[in-house]
């Protein structure tokens, strides 16, 4: 599937001119601000989730975004940029795809590659669905039990 055939789902509040231009693009379906339940439901409509984090901001290199947990639960592979250390386990399982941060051509080539070989996406979806996952509250109970 050529990149031009993809539909991009965008949620949230546009806070700058670039975001306004993005949601005006004909390939974008802008859903506005949504609550957590609606946001989770959007993953079931998605082929992949785009999760890019500036590796120049140190916390971004070691954080594990809630979005990835949503991807695990819904079987939705994600795209992440290089420089995010916590994505390495997903990457080694072939449960996500990696592009260069700040390089739109890298993302374009990745999307073209995925469009040309949808089996890559299917396989990554199967892989991410097999990632062991504990909900946040269960993880916190385990942390708090160690403190007590």
Image: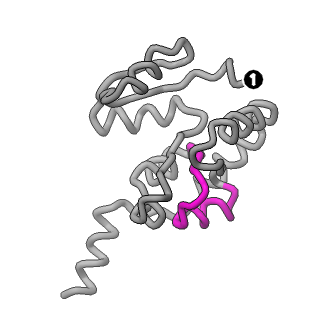
Residue 89: percent from the left, percent from the top? Answer: 60, 66
Span of residues in magenta: 76-94
Is residue 48 in the magenta section?
no
Quarter containing the C terminus: bottom left
99, above or below 37, in the image: below
Residue under circle 1?
A: 2
Please name whichever residue, 16 or 11, is drawn nearer the observer in this view of the structure: 16
Q: How many numbered marks does the figure carry? A: 1
Residue 78 visible in rendering = no
Residue 144's image quarter?
bottom left
Residue 134's image quarter?
bottom left
Q: Is residue 11 left or right of residue 43?
A: left
Residue 35: percent from the left, percent from the top? Answer: 27, 34
Q: Residues within 10 Å of mark 1 (few under 14, many from 20)?
A: few
Q: Is residue 116 left or right of residue 32?
A: right
Q: Secondary structure at mark 1?
A: loop
Please name whichever residue, 61 or 118, is drawn nearer the observer in this view of the structure: 61
Is residue 86 in the magenta section?
yes
Residue 136 visible in rendering = yes
Residue 83: percent from the left, percent from the top? Answer: 57, 61
What's the colour scheme?
A: one colour
Residue 102: percent from the left, percent from the top? Answer: 57, 44
Residue at 42% over, 59% down: 57
Quarter containing the N terminus: top right
Residue at 65% over, 60% down: 91
Residue at 22% over, 86% down: 147
Residue at 75% over, 31% down: 115
Please name whichever residue, 24 or 114, is drawn nearer the observer in this view of the structure: 24
Q: Residue furthest right?
A: 116
């Amino acid at each position: 599937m050529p990149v031009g055939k993809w539909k991009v789902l965008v949620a949230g509040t546009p806070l700058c001119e670039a975001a306004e231009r993005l949601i005006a693009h004909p390939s974008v379906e802008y859903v506005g601000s949504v609550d957590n339940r609606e946001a989770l439901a959007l993953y079931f409509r998605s082929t992949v989730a785009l999760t890019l984090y500036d590796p120049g901001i140190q916390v971004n290199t070691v954080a594990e975004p809630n979005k990835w947990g949503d991807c695990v639960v819904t079987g939705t592979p994600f795209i992440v940029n290089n420089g995010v250390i916590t994505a390495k386990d997903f990457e080694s399982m072939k449960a996500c795809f990696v592009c260069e941060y700040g390089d739109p051509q890298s993302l374009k080539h990745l999307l073209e590659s995925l469009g040309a070989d949808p089996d890559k996406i299917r396989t990554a979806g199967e892989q991410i669905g097999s990632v062991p996952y504990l909900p946040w509250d269960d993880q916190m109970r385990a942390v708090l039990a160690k403190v007590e």
